[in-house]
Image: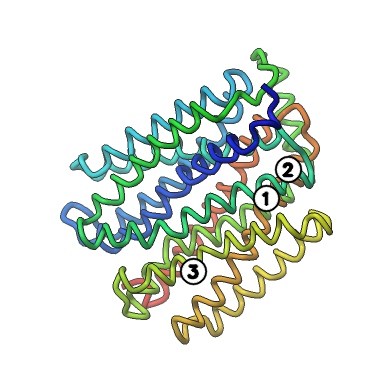
């Protein structure tokens, strides 16, 4: 079956896979205030769950792409979806903090396959500008789903408690596994046989590539900005603006819709300009909005929403383009390159998160 004839099926499966990779953390941000006062939970413990999830993201991405070079993309992806389903379902049933911490780390490890393997699949199918456009389209469709989800899940959480979030994620992961099995073919043409020294050599060659490191670090910065908002945005809405979860989730969805608009803009404008131009434009706009939100963004809910919307729009243009430029030199190392890209990106974001969390604790209305 020619790959190109089934692009729509591949896009559907990868869209759901992206959602399953991001939604467990996106929706977790909705229940952080509720979990913090739940018996057996503490604010420090809930913050640790977020950090451990991000650590799992980093560690997992270092593994999945490499493994898929030897076992195939589709088989590894289905295994990872099964892991997400099991660990997500068990989280609230585990009574001890230590057990929940292990589950969140493991959930991050498995969920990272949903970010790592689609990147390898994009590189299996395309390169350069075509790869960035395909990635933008899949991102746009997945963000449409994730923009609506906080409103729907926020309502369910208000009615049924934090358990509703985990039920929704488990149902979604099951649906994604079915779609992956039905619509996603094996895109890896030739599976590799493992040999230790050639493998180490390929890792070293990628890490010595300046273009790869530069654009991966830019992607890590963008990912940090997104994760920082998802981890701390709820505190701003509730502690600073005094809004209930049902009141602020519509604003939250508007902000996250910027990733949709950024991906849509990117897919259109890339037909007329270069990937590099879009990266510089997105980076400049992101930096400008970060300055503006620190100066004026907390004056009103509408000001905060507008500035953050533009910030997320700029980030939506950066993700696909940084990926395309970082992976550009590697025609036959998609799995290894994707693993290293994801690990460096999320490790960079995690380091910045520690700095950001320290700053949050220093700001009274966020810390309490």
**Residue 75: x, y in percent?**
52, 22
Label 1 vs label 3, nearer the camera: 3
Q: Earlier in the sequence, mark 2 or mark 1?
A: 2
Label 2 sits on residue: 131
Q: Are marks 2 and 1 in contact (CB under 8 Å)?
A: yes
| Residue drawn at x 31%, y 68% as measured from the top left | 245
Label 3 sits on residue: 254
| Image quadrant where residue 278 sits | bottom right
Q: Is residue 120 left or right of residue 101?
A: right
Q: Which of the pair 148/82 is nearer the observer?
A: 148
| Residue drawn at x 66%, y 46% as measured from the top left | 135
Q: CA distance from mark 2 to mark 1?
A: 8 Å
Label 1 sits on residue: 320
| Residue drawn at x 20%, y 40% as measured from the top left | 93
**Residue 282: x, y in percent?**
70, 64
Give the position of the N terminus as an image quadrant.
top right
Q: Are marks 2 and 3 in contact (CB under 8 Å)?
A: no
């Amino acid at each position: 079956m020619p790959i190109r004839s089934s692009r729509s099926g591949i896009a559907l499966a990868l869209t759901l896979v992206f959602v399953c990779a991001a939604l467990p953390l996106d929706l977790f941000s909705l229940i952080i205030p509720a979990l913090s006062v739940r018996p057996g939970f503490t604010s420090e413990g809930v913050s640790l769950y977020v950090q451990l999830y991000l650590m799992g993201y980093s560690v997992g991405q270092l593994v999945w792409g490499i493994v898929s070079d030897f076992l195939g993309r589709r088989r590894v992806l289905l295994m990872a979806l099964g892991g997400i389903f099991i660990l997500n379902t068990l989280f609230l049933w585990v009574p001890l903090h230590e057990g929940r911490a292990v589950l969140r780390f493991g959930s991050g490890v498995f969920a990272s396959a949903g970010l790592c393997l689609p990147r390898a699949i994009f590189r299996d199918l395309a390169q350069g500008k075509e790869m960035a456009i395909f990635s933008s389209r899949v991102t746009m469709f997945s963000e449409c789903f994730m923009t609506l989800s906080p409103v729907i899940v926020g309502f369910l959480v208000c009615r049924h408690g934090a358990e509703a979030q985990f039920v929704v994620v488990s149902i979604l992961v099951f649906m994604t596994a079915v779609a992956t099995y039905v619509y996603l073919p094996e895109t890896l043409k030739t599976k590799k046989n493992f040999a230790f020294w050639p493998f180490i050599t390929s890792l070293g060659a990628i890490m010595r590539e300046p273009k790869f490191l530069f654009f991966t670090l830019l992607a890590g910065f963008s990912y940090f900005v997104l994760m920082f908002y998802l981890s701390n945005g709820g505190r701003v809405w509730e502690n600073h603006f005094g809004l209930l979860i049902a009141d602020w989730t519509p604003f939250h969805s508007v902000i996250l819709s910027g990733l949709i608009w950024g991906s849509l803009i990117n897919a259109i404008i890339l037909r007329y300009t270069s990937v590099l131009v879009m990266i510089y434009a997105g980076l400049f706009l992101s930096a400008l909005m970060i300055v503006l939100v620190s100066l004026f963004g907390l004056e009103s809910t509408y000001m905060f929403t507008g500035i953050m919307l533009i910030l997320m729009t700029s980030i939506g243009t950066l993700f696909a383009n940084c990926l395309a430029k970082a992976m550009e030199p590697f025609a036959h190392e998609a799995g290894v390159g994707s693993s290293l890209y994801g690990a460096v990106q999320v490790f960079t974001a995690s380091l910045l998160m520690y700095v950001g969390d320290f700053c949050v604790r220093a700001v009274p209305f966020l810390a309490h």
